[in-house]
Image (cartoon, rainbow, N blue to C red):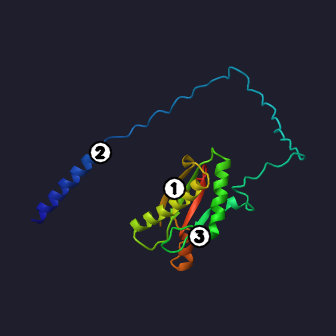
Amino acid sequence: MHALRIASLGLALGAMLAGCSGGPVSEQSPAGVEERQPSQPAAQPQPVKPPSVARVDLTAKPPAKSPLTDPGSILSRRSIFYDLDSYDVKDQFKELVEAHAKYLRDNPQTKMLIQGNTDERGSREYNISLGQRRSEGVKRMLLLLGAKEDQVESVSLGEEKPKDEGHDEQAWSKNRRSDILYQGEY
């Protein structure tokens, strides 16, 4: 029995060695090198031109600031805040809405988007509805004050765009608002 094992082991070893003998490995011949002569002389480097210097007229008046971005203008204020579950524009924001209505009257090509926002309390459906009532209320005031229908669009963002991520009255009071955006800002 022991002899049979040794014989079968020898046959297996022989079969393995036979499988590995592929003969000598031939080396690949090296790649040929092609010699070339340049047909034209090397190009001479071109001189580098110094950059031109812009002229500044110090006597010219600076461009006028837009009243929409001038921090000293009421038009730079763009948010109207509300009480809980309310869409009535408070008296303290009526002057702001009037100023934006006048700007729209004076600039008939200008377009505006009003985004109604809510705090996180209330169902999603309720907040979308309340946000829409808030933006529509501001739009209605603008139209009554002389803005044109095609200048003003109102949408509701509900609770989706909070100004403050907190979960207390201080944060919620910042999130109950309508935001005014002019064309190019939305």
The kind of residue tagged 2 is Ser
Q: Are marks 3 and 2 in contact (CB under 8 Å)?
A: no
Compare marks 1 and 3 and give the one earlier in the sequence: 3
What is the spatial separation of the Cα atoms under label 3 and label 2, in whole angstroms?
Answer: 96 Å
Task: Pick out the residue farthest to the left.
Answer: 1
**Earlier sequence position, callout 1 versus callout 2:** 2
| Residue drawn at 51 percent across, 55 percent down | 154
**Residue 113's x, y, as percent?**
56, 54
Instruction: Say which residue label 2 marks.
Output: 21
Q: Nearer the viewer, residue 155 or 47?
A: 155
Q: Residues within 10 Å of mark 3 (few under 14, many from 20)?
A: few
| Residue linked to disc 1 | 154
Q: Is residue 34 left or right of residue 49?
A: left
- Disc 3: which residue: 90
Q: Residue at x 66, y 47 (%)?
A: 107
Give the Cα separation between the discs numbered 1 and 2: 84 Å
Taking the view exactly as shown, the residue that stands out farthest to the bottom is 168
Instruction: Name the kind of residue labelled 1 in the image.
Output: Ser
Residue 153 in the image, given as x and y percentages of width and height: 53, 52
Residue, x 68% and y 23% (percent of image)?
38
Contact check, label 1 and label 2, Cβ < 8 Å:
no
Q: Earlier in the sequence, mark 3 or mark 2?
A: 2
Q: Secondary structure at mark 3?
A: loop
